[in-house]
Amino acid sequence: MKNQVREIVEDCLANITPDELNTLTDLLRGFQKKQQNINNSYVDALMHMEKTMTNEQCEITVPISPLLNNSFGIVHGGITATIIDTAMGTLANFLLPEGYGAVTTQLNIHYLSVGKGDYIQCKAHLEHKGTKTMVMSAYVYRSDGKKMAHATGSFFIIRKNN
């Protein structure tokens, strides 16, 4: 398996452009973050998510790189959705007692402007916490301060199987 990976890497490096080399390096640095347990998941690590938590808000900042862009050179809408879902889900799980977790049941996103700049930042807040469900809201901002997206999400509260 390692030889297959080496062959793929060598093939990629044979004709790599400087921009592609930067993107590959960024990807591999994210992979290392997961290996070093700096991030909880590969998604968090590969996107270089930085999280700040309080009892009222989860804030995630992600540097914009070509790896996150669509064919128009702007942040892919699915990447924005992933960041929103991660922020909301992280906050939901943070607020639950030991032995419980939250899973997304619905996510609604209004894209307000294109994703460009140095980074994007998502701020998720709790709107409602019941015994079986939670409702979250989130806003995403670009590095220039412009609001990029508004979202709401619903989450089932479940018992974790340990």
Image: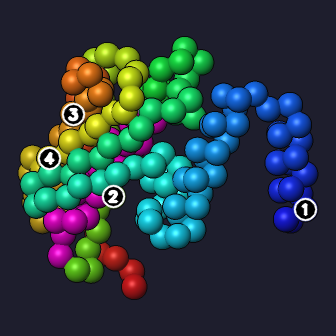
Rendered position, 74 above or below 49:
above
Residue 83 falls left or right of residue 90? right
Residue behind mark 4 = 125
Which label belongs to residue 139? 3
Under circle 4, the secondary element is strand
Residue nearest the viewer, comparing 161 with 71: 71
The Cα–Cα distance between marks 3 and 1, rounded to whole angstroms, is 44 Å
**2 or 4: tag closer to the N-terminus:** 2
Badge 2 vs badge 4, beta-carbon distance below 8 Å: no
Residue behind mark 1 = 3
Can you tell which quarter of the image residue 22 is in? top right
The answer to whether residue 106 of the structure is visible from this angle is: no
Q: Residue at x 59, y 18 (%)?
A: 71
Name the amino acid type tagged 2.
Val
**1 or 2: tag closer to the N-terminus:** 1
The Cα–Cα distance between marks 3 and 4, rounded to whole angstroms, is 9 Å
Name the amino acid type tagged 4.
His
Name the amino acid type tagged 1.
Asn
Q: Which residues are magenta?
A: 78-97
Q: Residue at x 83, y 40 (%)?
A: 13
Give x and y (percent) for residue 114: 37, 17
Under circle 1, the secondary element is helix
The answer to whether residue 124 of the structure is visible from this angle is: yes
Badge 1 vs badge 4, beta-carbon distance below 8 Å: no
Q: Is residue 89 magenta?
A: yes
Majority secondary structure in the magenta region: helix
The Cα–Cα distance between marks 1 and 4, rounded to whole angstroms, is 46 Å
Front of the two marks 1 and 4: 1
Under circle 2, the secondary element is strand
| Extreme residue in the bottom direction | 162
The Cα–Cα distance between marks 1 and 2, rounded to whole angstroms, is 38 Å
